[in-house]
Amino acid sequence: MLRMMVITAHPDDEAGNFGGSLRLYHDREVETCVVCLTPGQAGSHRGGARNDQQLAVMRRKEFAASCAILKVSQALVLDYPDGQLHRPDVYRVVADLALHVRRFQPQVLLTFGPEGGVTGHTDHSMASVFATLAFHWAGRDNRFLDQLQGEIKPHRAQKLYYGSADFTLPGRPPVVPSPITTTIEIGDYLETKIAAFKAHASQAPLWPMFEENMRKRGRRETFHLAASAISALPESETDLFAGVDGNPRSSVL
């Protein structure tokens, strides 16, 4: 079984940044997992919520609805503080994510680039840092030894991708995305991606801008191959699983 994991910061990131690829690869019989670090309780758009706790509950439900549209196999929302991902202990967060990597055993892991995506959001940048370390450390038998019990063993994912883009958003901080190495043609899954984003009803004020930008960008999602255990890959890819060994056995660096 081929497996792909996506690590994000907020509910709606899974649709807005990775939704087309998530649904495309599900329909290619890839098992998918999304780990969202925060429940989005500090969002600017509140959807009528009277406090952060109500918004967190609302956004968890929206995340579940979006992931259902994208046919995500496993969808998890963790409890790290929205808007404050620069504050938690890095080692603790990476340990948490490494455990999820070891349990799910993906061959491919997707996350934001360290610039924070087109929005330049600090939480997105921190999600990139955490996910990158988890990608590397989950495969080592000298990291998080307390986890290595029973069926939990070191697992080395084969490829790490950062979401990338060839456009910027007006009115946002300047960002320098990683070079595009991989272009995924998502075709009609663009409509699925937009529908999944609109499952986040609390974020309705963002819908028109999101849809406009996605339609301008076309029926594709773009990535930067940040790390790979596979040699002799082409300079330009059209498949996130190019060269991947589908053997699910764990391996140790």
Image: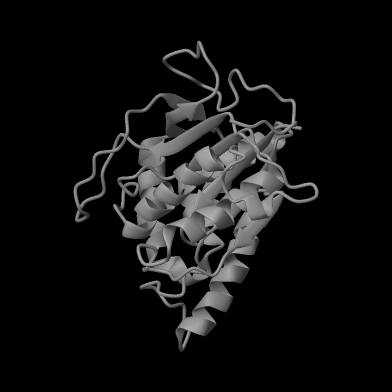
Residue 7: horizontal and vertical position, in percent? 52, 50
Q: In this rendered view, identify the residue nearer to me: 147 or 68.
A: 147
Q: Quadrant of residue 64?
A: bottom right
Relative to 37, residue 153 above or below: above
Relative to 25, residue 77 above or below: below
Q: Quadrant of the C terminus?
A: top right
- The residue under the point 75% across, 51% down is 149
Relative to 231, residue 190 above or below: below
Residue 240: horizontal and vertical position, in percent? 55, 28
Q: In this rendered view, identify the residue nearer to me: 6 or 141.
A: 141
Image colouring: one colour
Task: Give the mark count.
Answer: 0
Q: In this rendered view, identify the residue nearer to me: 2 or 94.
A: 94
Q: Quadrant of the N terminus?
A: top right
Q: Quadrant of residue 26?
A: top right
Asked whether residue 141 is in view, the answer is yes
- The residue under the point 60% across, 34% down is 157
**In the image, farthest residue toward the right:** 150
Asked whether residue 190 is in view, the answer is no
Q: Quadrant of residue 44?
A: bottom left
Residue 136: horizontal and vertical position, in percent? 51, 38
**In the image, farthest residue toward the bottom:** 50
Relative to 22, residue 11 above or below: below
Q: Is 131 on the left or on the right of 120, as rendered?
A: right
Q: Is 93 on the left or on the right of 87, as rendered?
A: right
Q: Is 17 on the left or on the right of 213, as rendered?
A: right
